[in-house]
């Protein structure tokens, strides 16, 4: 019964995503709809479960690089922070988007907004309890400053979107947020911020920005209708330059890793692998809606390194 329901959700989600005109660029096999994998990816994307999973994987990888004593409380707090940020942003986007212009994931959030709003409040309370009971006091201040900065950005971006996102593209800001969230508790428990740590965090932020860039490419037509202000809607070259940018970035990161010690080098190699996978699926699927489902999977490359080591 569960698998049947899950397959139905996936069929509807993928069918919705295939209605845009660029779906004709897909290879023949990718036109099959309703597969179990697609169903799981649609469900994960709609419920914002993919972002916390990716964040936990990279936090664990970074903690192993520096032998940082990251505790279960740090992991649970990171999962709460990431889910609250992504689901909150999606719920806030709903009211200002017209019904015809909403993506499948935004339509899901709008349709189920009462339940998701209640879940958001519950998760916020749970996150506050986790911080109070499981984290040391020394982690409260950096965590509070991070939340305050994120809240100020969201407020400013919604009040003056063209001004704020005209200075720093949305994709880059999302990448910076995600990188800080994943590395914050690693370096607070470590008690220092090595120069190499800054390099790794910056490289990861750029990878996350590439992932957001890819998704912005798939949402380009819809974002233009909605008047969204991001890298792809602001610059005509950004839509076609993504594959080359991801390939060049991956090659550059791989080259830099050759000059670093083993542990940091592996971290950069995982970043390069994710970038190459993102380039590969972009070339294979094209800038289609299905890329939205698979883009975040490319960020799970640290699992290979964690299993091997």
Image (cartoon, rainbow, N blue to C red):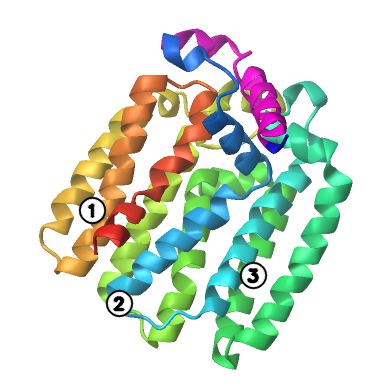
Q: Residues within 10 Å of mark 3 (few under 14, many from 20)?
A: some
Q: Secondary structure at mark 2?
A: helix
Check disc 2 and report the residue beneath it.
66
Between 157 and 217, the residue placed more toward the observer is 217
Say whether disc 3 or disc 2 marks the residue closer to the N-terminus: 2
Q: Are marks 1 and 2 in contact (CB under 8 Å)?
A: no
Does residue 234 appear in the picture of this structure?
Answer: no
Q: Residues within 10 Å of mark 2 (few under 14, many from 20)?
A: some
Check disc 1 and report the residue beneath it.
269
Q: Secondary structure at mark 1?
A: helix
Check disc 3 and report the residue beneath it.
147
Residue 175 position within the rendered picture, expressed as x and y whole percent measured from the top left: 47, 52
Q: Is residue 88 above or below residue 284?
A: below
Query: Marks 1 and 2, how far apart in space?
Result: 16 Å
Say whether disc 1 or disc 2 marks the residue closer to the N-terminus: 2
In the image, 205: left or right of 104? left
Between 243 and 161, the residue placed more toward the observer is 243
In the image, 109: left or right of 191? right
Q: Is residue 210 above or below residue 184?
A: above
Q: Residues within 10 Å of mark 1 (few under 14, many from 20)?
A: many
Between 3 and 200, the residue placed more toward the observer is 3
Q: Secondary structure at mark 3?
A: helix
Give the image quarter of residue 273: top left
Quadrant occupied by the C terminus: bottom left
Q: Are marks 3 and 2 in contact (CB under 8 Å)?
A: no
Q: Image point 33% across, 69% down: which residue?
A: 198
Q: Image point 40% across, 67% down: which residue?
A: 60
- In the image, the segment drawn in magenta is 3-27
| Badge nearest the viewer, 3 or 2 | 2
């Amino acid at each position: 019964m569960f698998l049947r329901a899950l397959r139905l959700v996936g069929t509807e989600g993928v069918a919705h995503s295939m209605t845009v005109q660029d779906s004709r660029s897909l290879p023949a096999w990718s036109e099959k709809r309703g597969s179990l994998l697609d169903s799981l990816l649609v469900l994960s994307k709609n419920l914002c479960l993919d972002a916390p999973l990716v964040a936990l994987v990279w936090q664990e990888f970074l903690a192993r690089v520096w032998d940082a004593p990251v505790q279960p409380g740090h992991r649970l707090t990171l999962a709460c922070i990431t889910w609250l940020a992504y689901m909150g942003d999606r719920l806030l986007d709903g009211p200002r988007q017209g019904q015809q212009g909403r993506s499948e994931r935004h339509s899901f959030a709008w349709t189920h907004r009462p339940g998701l709003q209640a879940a958001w409040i519950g998760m916020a309370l749970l996150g506050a309890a986790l911080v109070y009971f499981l984290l040391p006091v020394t982690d409260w201040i950096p965590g509070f400053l991070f939340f305050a900065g994120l809240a100020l950005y969201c407020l400013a971006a919604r009040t003056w979107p063209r001004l704020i996102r005209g200075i720093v593209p949305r994709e880059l800001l999302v990448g910076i947020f995600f990188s800080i969230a994943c590395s914050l508790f690693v370096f607070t428990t470590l008690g220092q911020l090595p120069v190499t740590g800054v390099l790794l965090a910056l490289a990861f932020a750029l990878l996350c920005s590439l992932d957001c860039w890819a998704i912005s490419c798939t949402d380009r037509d819809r974002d233009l209708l909605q008047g969204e202000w991001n890298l792809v809607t602001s610059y005509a070259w950004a839509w076609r330059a993504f594959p080359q940018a991801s390939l060049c970035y991956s090659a550059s990161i791989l080259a830099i890793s050759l000059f670093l010690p083993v542990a940091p080098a592996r971290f950069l190699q995982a970043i390069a692998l994710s970038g190459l996978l993102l380039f590969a699926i972009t070339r294979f699927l094209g800038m289609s809606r299905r890329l939205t489902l698979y883009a975040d999977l490319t960020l799970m490359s640290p699992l290979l390194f964690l299993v091997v080591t």
